[in-house]
Amino acid sequence: MARTLEFGQDYVETLELADGTPVRLRPIQPSDKDQLARGLARLSPESRYLRFFTEKSHLSTQELAYLTEVDGVDHFALVAVHRETGEGIGVARFVRLAPEGDDAGDAHVAEAAVVVLDEFQNRGLGSLLLRRLSAAALERGIDRFAAEILGENQRIRHVLAAVSPDTEFVQDDDSIHAHVPLVAPAPDAPTDSLAHRLLAEVASGALELRHRLMVLKRTASS
């Protein structure tokens, strides 16, 4: 019998952020392409740079399809929608490095990214999306997130300086590759663990998923 996922296609969560902003969380849908395109246009140049490592101005048709037409297992994404306006204000996703069932160790590792519109940052939405994304990854057999960090980001460098022995990181030119173990937290567990602090950098835009968009760009131009 197929297991029932808490964060499956029927998942919907309605809540309010700490400042009262009404939000609905749900899995991304193919019909979200226009929302995603509008969201990119609303990001500041700095947020775009942190997200894509370049000042990306638009998403191609191929990129929009890749980002919204996901299988929900190896590629999973959540969107945060403002309940009053109906507009998307944040998105979190992971992409498994190898398909589920693959014997390679990468089947338990996923690249992760979270982005929140500038006007809704610093309200706890990024952390909220990150917690839900981590839980969704764990129930799909993923136990580690991999992320690429801009080497110029001093804040994440300070975090890496205090990294635990179980965390792997590699300097690669102007970027750093971080590999962060995911552990299901106890209900009363503190949120200042190394893994949580590293993953919180995702929500602030310091850890980004970009590899597959770069592959798509190269494919489209070839």
Image (cartoon, rainbow, N blue to C red):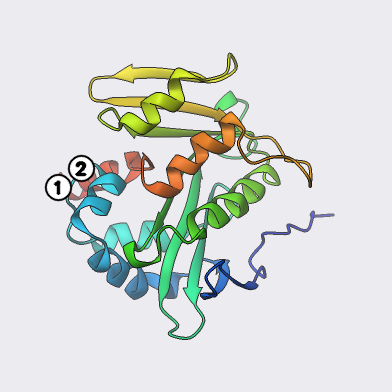
Q: Nearer the viewer, residue 159 or 36?
A: 159
Query: Which of the 4 image quadrants contains residue 149?
Result: top left
Q: Is there CB contact under 8 Å for labels 2 and 1?
A: yes
Q: What is the x, y in percent for residue 179? A: 50, 27
Q: Nearer the viewer, residue 140 or 15?
A: 15
Query: Which of the 4 image quadrants contains residue 3?
Result: bottom right
Q: Secondary structure at mark 1?
A: helix
Q: Is residue 190 at least partly visible in the picture?
A: yes
Please indicate whether residue 39 sits to the left or right of residue 98 in the image: left
Please indicate whether residue 71 sits to the left or right of residue 86 in the image: right
10 Å crowding of disc 2: few (<14), some (14-19), many (20+): few
Q: CA distance from mark 2 to mark 1?
A: 5 Å
Residue at mark 2: 218
Amino acid type, callout 2: Arg
Task: Say which residue appears at 67% left-offset and 59% top-offset.
Answer: 7
Q: What is the x, y in percent for residue 203? A: 45, 49
Residue at mark 1: 221
Q: Is residue 121 above or below residue 95?
A: below
Q: Quadrant of the C terminus?
A: top left
Q: Secondary structure at mark 2?
A: helix
Please indicate whether residue 57 sits to the left or right of residue 12 in the image: left
Q: What is the x, y in percent for residue 75? A: 51, 50
Amino acid type, callout 1: Ser
Task: Say which residue appears at 53% left-offset and 52% top-offset.
Answer: 127
Furthest residue in direction right, as rendered:
1
Task: Say which residue appears at 56% left-offset and 68% top-offset.
Answer: 17
Task: Say which residue appears at 23% left-offset and 25% top-offset.
Answer: 174
Q: Quadrant of the N terminus?
A: bottom right
